[in-house]
Image (spheres, rainbow, N blue to C red):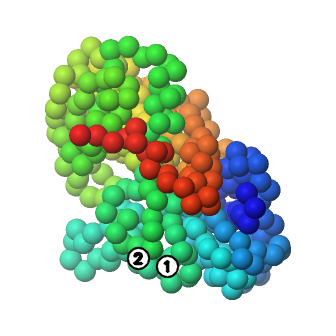
Amino acid sequence: MNGLAIFSGNSNRELSQKICQQLGVTQTNVLVDKFSEGEIRVEIKQNIRGKDVFIIQPTCPPSNDNLMELLIMIDAARRASAERITAVLPYYGYARQDRKDQPRVPITAKLVANLIVAAGANRVLTMDLHANQIQGFFDIPVDHLYGINALCDYFNSKKIENLVVVSPDVGGIKMARAYSKILNATLAIVDKRRDNPEKTVVMNILGDVKGKNAILVDDIVATAGSLVEAVAALKAQGVKDVYAAVSHGILSGVAIERIKECDALKELVITDSVPLNESKQISKIKAVTVAPLLAEAINRIHSEESISCLFEETKTN
């Protein structure tokens, strides 16, 4: 680990600490605070000249503050003569704004990519992007990991029988197929239409789910509206127990209330890419760590080794 420097902003310090523990290194001392008027203040307290710097900062809510912290930390590291700067984004905010789906709207996922590159990042390490094509928004190397193995390890330990993996929409079929392969389960799809960005109406369930235990798989749960609708549709089709496996638990707005009130949902399993604040810690929500995955990727990038072995299990035909 000679020549390696790892630090983070305020978005997910617990995950950063876990990653450093996995690597057996001490975090670089960095002050990330605010001035009295609200402007973000960053000061790197240790020498990082000529070092391989990894800045761990998921741009989760509050998205704007965390994004600005990331950009300012990248700029500070560049001006401190870091040899290489890798932005580690376990969660990539603004990812759902990845195309023009209406007239006169921005493609903010591309804008954020431009900002990260302009700030001085040489590389990006991220996990479970909302759309794989976001990798192409960057003009620097992007390593895209998946949290599927951490989530599947948890469900395999529960030894759930007669299992079906359910994709929440047609776009999630590829990932759902990867889950079904690892969990040795059958596959089903929720056919739905979206009335607006915050609300969906479930239309039908494609596949045999009656009498089975279901795992809904998705990349993001925000307000949990789609999740609750899908759970209700599955129960109406005769599913026994319904679980959910989601990479990024944003859990904004009324999400916690919806999950509490959804008796049909047995358990929601998320990763710690986004911190699970104390107010969101309820018995139905379980967080599994992706620190070992990210630590191994950081180690391999620093050592100039391939990281393709870290996501071979997710490949599907």
User: x and y percent of residue 256 in the render?
Assistant: 51, 42
Q: Mark 1 falls on what kind of element?
A: helix
| Residue 7, quarter of the rendered image | bottom right
| Residue at image coords 30%, 17% | 212
| Residue 134, quarter of the rendered image | bottom left
Q: Give the quadrant of the N terminus.
A: bottom right
Q: Of the two numbered discs 1 and 2 on the same chain, state the one appearing first in sequence.
A: 1
- Write down the residue under mark 1: 117
Q: Are marks 1 and 2 in contact (CB under 8 Å)?
A: yes
| Residue at image coords 43%, 36% | 245
Q: Mark 2 falls on what kind of element?
A: loop
Which of discs 1 and 2 lies nearer the camera? The answer is 2
| Residue at image coords 46%, 59% | 143
- Write down the residue under mark 2: 139
Label 2: how many residues lie within 10 Å, few (<14), some (14-19) or many (20+)? few
Q: Give the quadrant of the C terminus.
A: top left
Work out how far the residue at label 1 is from the one at label 2, CA to CA, in angstroms: 7 Å
User: x and y percent of residue 206 in the render?
Assistant: 16, 32
Q: Between residues 68 and 239, which one lies in front from this camera angle?
A: 68
Q: Is residue 262 left or right of residue 36?
A: left
Q: How many marks?
A: 2
